[in-house]
Image (cartoon, rainbow, N blue to C red):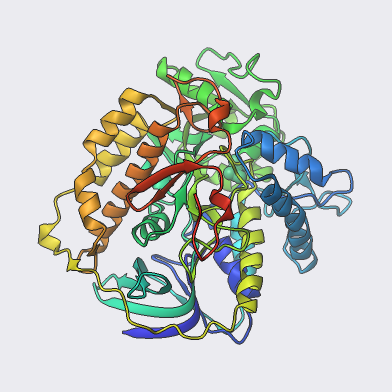
């Protein structure tokens, strides 16, 4: 089956829906998702949207908080744009009826989260902001938008000279392959938390967009920066979901097995210190075989304030009356991804990336809490406005690039995705060092991955394709983590424990098999990225 559209969007989270909402109503827009439209990470978001909407807050303070959390590994200009436009976008959403939480006097109730110097987190339904926001955006999707569910996009279709992306190939559960051609192809596939066994992400979030863009030759950067959220619910040796930072914002404190405060004396913001610092402290206690708990006994009306978290705890047999929630850190957010410019353009013509799959320059080495829904909203809108002005792009069907070979299902070696996850947490987890990173690289079938670059994955099963994507992303992350010989933000190297000025602002960029580190990655535009 072949279909044509003006814009093909892969992914169904906040960035995708915001983009679709702002695209020209005359465009035929197709949103594709590999599962159901409500299965995105955005839908699960508990934290909220960070934005300057109060008279007592200031744009420059939000910019500063973002830069500090990201350890200045950002484009200050991009951060400024995010905060400024974010404030407008969120005010507009509130005005158009997003049901945000309000206080007794009817004002927007603003929450506090880690590393924010002001209360500026807008919530809906207590801890169900993602769900409310996605439902709000879905309700307002115009009729020109078609949603295709349960189809895994596995390849970007390029012109014969590989100079432009003109479509995607997708596989449905019955194994049939469909091609969707579009004048603009937008990756909004979210993060890659499920490369680790402990994660807040949906189990299928393995970084499809990054792996596909990498195979298509787009620049991918900053993949060593994986944020570990300090507090995932931990029951019977498994993580069961997120315990939002808003819980600490409301007064919960972290205790070890002996009831000692673990963040005391570590950082002036104590339990609300930047995430990598809190995650590291918990990780150290866990390495000493200690359990770590969130003490929620000081929070009045907990179940009323955090209905989704309370339900999650009840389902997992955690008795909230005891006032202690067992937690461990787990992978949560990918700061790196496909290099884009301010309009979502990647280094491949016709291909855009927005949201968590993109490396937009706003998060740096560690994302500030609740800046991710904000990024999706801002870049979704901006990219739509850019595409609306690019409507002159007309010729999409030209000679298609054909991979020299198609991998046969029975030719695929048995790659173990479960083992990959455990190796990732062990070797490329909260703390890294050269020995562990080399162990990971030696374990990965690097030559096989390279040989697959020139082969179509069309004949493989969905499971096999996803496994290959996981291995590709693991390779990029591990290689980058090995090259970055410093600790910065979420990338903590025990053998290089300090920040190194040499690496500040230097992005490790992968373009297929070429790896460079340079400063100009965010000056990408669709005629190429200059080193
Ligand atoms: C949280 O609620 O702690 C997560 C919010 C975020 O990651 O921004």
Relative to the observer, which residue lies in front, 200 or 18?
18
Relative to the observer, which residue lies in front, 223 or 465?
223
Please report the residue visible at 47 percent of the width from the left and 18 percent of the height from the top.
Answer: 285
Residue 477 higher or lower than 379, as above or below? above
Picture quarter with the N terminus = bottom left
Residue 83 higher or lower than 140, as above or below? above
Please report the residue visible at 26 percent of the width from the left and 58 percent of the height from the top.
Answer: 453
Residue 181 higher or lower than 359, as above or below? below
Residue 404 higher or lower than 391, as above or below? above
Please report the residue visible at 84 percent of the width from the left and 44 percent of the height from the top.
Answer: 58
On the rendering, which quadrant does ligand 1 occupy? Answer: top right
Q: Does residue 301 appear in this view? A: no
Residue 375 placement (x, y as % from top left): 63, 54
Specify the quadrant of the image occupied by residue 250: top right
Looking at the image, residue 59 sits to the left or right of residue 146; the answer is: right
Specify the quadrant of the image occupied by residue 389: bottom right
Residue 358 placement (x, y as % from top left): 52, 54
Please report the residue visible at 52 percent of the width from the left and 44 percent of the height from the top.
Answer: 335
Specify the quadrant of the image occupied by residue 501: top right
Residue 300 placement (x, y as % from top left): 72, 34
Q: Residue furthest left?
A: 410
Q: Does residue 327 appear in this view? A: yes
């Amino acid at each position: 089956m072949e279909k044509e559209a003006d814009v093909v969007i892969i992914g169904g989270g906040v960035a995708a829906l915001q983009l679709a909402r702002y695209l020209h109503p005359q465009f035929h827009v197709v949103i594709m998702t590999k599962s159901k439209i409500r299965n995105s990470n955005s839908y699960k978001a508990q934290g909220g949207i960070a934005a300057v909407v109060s008279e007592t807050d200031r744009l420059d303070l939000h910019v500063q908080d973002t830069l500090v959390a990201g350890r200045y590994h950002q484009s200050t200009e991009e951060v400024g744009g995010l905060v400024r436009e974010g404030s407008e976008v969120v005010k507009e959403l509130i005005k158009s009826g997003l049901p945000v939480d309000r206080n007794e006097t009817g004002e927007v109730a603003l929450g506090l989260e880690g590393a924010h110097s002001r209360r500026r987190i807008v919530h809906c339904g207590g801890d169900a902001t993602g769900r409310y926001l996605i439902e709000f955006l879905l309700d307002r999707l115009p009729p020109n938008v078609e949603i295709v569910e349960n189809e895994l996009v596995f390849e970007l279709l390029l012109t014969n000279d590989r100079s432009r992306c003109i479509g995607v190939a997708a596989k449905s559960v019955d194994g049939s392959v469909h091609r969707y051609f579009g004048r603009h192809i937008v990756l909004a596939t979210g993060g890659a938390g499920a490369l680790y066994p402990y994660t807040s992400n949906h189990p299928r979030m393995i970084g499809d967009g990054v792996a596909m863009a990498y195979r298509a030759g787009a620049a991918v950067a900053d993949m060593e920066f994986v944020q570990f959220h300090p507090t995932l619910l931990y029951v019977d040796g498994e993580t069961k979901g997120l315990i939002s930072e808003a819980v600490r914002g409301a007064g919960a404190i972290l205790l070890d097995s002996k009831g000692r405060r673990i963040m005391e004396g570590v950082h002036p913001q104590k339990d609300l210190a930047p995430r990598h610092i809190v995650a590291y402290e918990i990780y150290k206690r866990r390495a000493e075989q200690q359990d770590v708990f969130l003490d929620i006994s000081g929070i009045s009306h907990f179940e009323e304030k955090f209905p989704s978290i309370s339900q999650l705890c009840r389902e997992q047999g955690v008795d909230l009356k005891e006032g202690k929630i067992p937690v461990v850190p787990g992978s949560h957010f990918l700061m790196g991804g496909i290099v884009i410019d301010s309009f979502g353009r990647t280094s491949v013509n016709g291909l855009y990336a927005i949201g968590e799959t993109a490396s937009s320059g706003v998060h740096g080495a560690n994302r500030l809490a609740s800046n991710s829904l904000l990024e999706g909203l801002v870049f979704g809108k901006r990219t739509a406005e850019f595409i609306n002005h690019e409507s002159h792009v007309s010729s999409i069907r030209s000679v298609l690039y054909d991979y020299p070979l198609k991998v046969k299902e029975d030719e695929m070696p048995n790659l173990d995705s479960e083992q990959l996850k455990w190796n990732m947490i062990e070797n490329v987890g909260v703390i890294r060092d050269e020995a562990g990173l080399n162990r990971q690289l030696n374990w990965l079938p690097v030559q096989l991955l390279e040989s697959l670059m020139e082969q179509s994955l069309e004949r493989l099963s969905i499971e096999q394709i996803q496994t290959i994507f996981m291995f590709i992303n693991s390779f990029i992350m591990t290689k980058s983590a090995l090259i970055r010989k410093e600790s910065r933000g979420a990338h903590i190297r025990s053998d290089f424990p300090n920040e190194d000025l040499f690496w500040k602002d230097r992005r490790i960029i992968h373009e297929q098999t070429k790896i460079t580190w340079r400063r100009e990655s965010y000056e990408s535009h669709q005629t190429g990225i200059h080193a």
